[in-house]
Image (tube, helix red, strand yellow):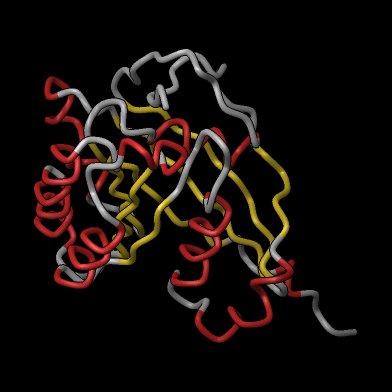
Amino acid sequence: MAQSGYSNPLKKFKLVFLGEQSVGKTSLITRFMYDSFDNTYQATIGIDFLSKTMYLEDRTVRLQLWDTAGQERFRSLIPSYIRDSSVAVVVYDITNKKTFENTRKWVDDVRGERGNDVIIVLVGNKTDLNDKREVTTQQGEEEAKKNNLMFIETSAKVGHNVKSLFKRIAQALPGMEGETQQGQSQMIDVNINPAQPQDNNSCAC
């Protein structure tokens, strides 16, 4: 009898979320994990961890989501979390140009720890506030192209492109290239691990 693909060892991939305070890192994770959004702003303190298992056609993948604080006083903690990550998700607020400009230092931090052996995704969040936009989509695309990054714009508040963000990440993971065309439409979110109470969302968007 043929072995089921799901009997293969579970592949785990570490995703670290980086960016300035209040750009929406926690809110993106919360939208992905629970399809919800909390308008109450509370900054992430230190590092939070959540895990989600996904089925990709013939294999199971566990995404380990590490949510980092954007405040300067926690910066010394972050390199150790970048060091063994598979993916770095660098988030900025499209209504705050400074947060976009500061993505360069986060990308430099990732390159410094991981070289080119990591997927980096540049995410422009808060597209629901498009009328207050300070960073154009073209600027984001150009920055990503210049630094060899993936790029997408999202809104954690309304859910725009959040699932697409994680699907694109899953498709880009090592060993996934051969399955992505068929697996994309069959991705199912399952088996959410127990997590901390949602009391530290870092997006007020």
- Whole-percent x, y for residue 157 in the image: 52, 33
In the rendered view, does 43 fall on the left or right side of 1? Answer: left
Which quadrant is home to the N terminus?
bottom right
In the rendered view, does 174 fall on the left or right side of 81? Answer: right
Query: Is residue 58 shown above or below 98?
Result: below
Which quadrant is home to the C terminus?
top left
Q: Farthest residue in the front direction? A: 131
Query: Is residue 164 shown above or below 78?
Result: below
- Whole-percent x, y for residue 133 in the image: 29, 42
Residue 191, quarter of picture: top right
In the rendered view, does 171 fall on the left or right side of 94? Answer: right
Foreground residue, 11 or 66? 66
- Whole-percent x, y for residue 114 in the image: 18, 60
Query: Is residue 34 shown above or below 57?
Result: above
Foreground residue, 201 or 48? 201
Q: Farthest residue in the right direction? A: 1
- Whole-percent x, y for residue 59 in the image: 67, 70
Which residue is pictured at 54% across the width and 48% down the height?
160
Foreground residue, 147 or 9? 147
In the rendered view, does 154 fall on the left or right side of 98? Answer: right
Which residue is pictured at 34% across the width and 45% down the height?
16
Query: Is residue 105 shown above or below 28?
Result: below
Which residue is pictured at 22% across the width and 42% down the height?
134
Which residue is pictured at 57% across the width and 16% down the height?
197
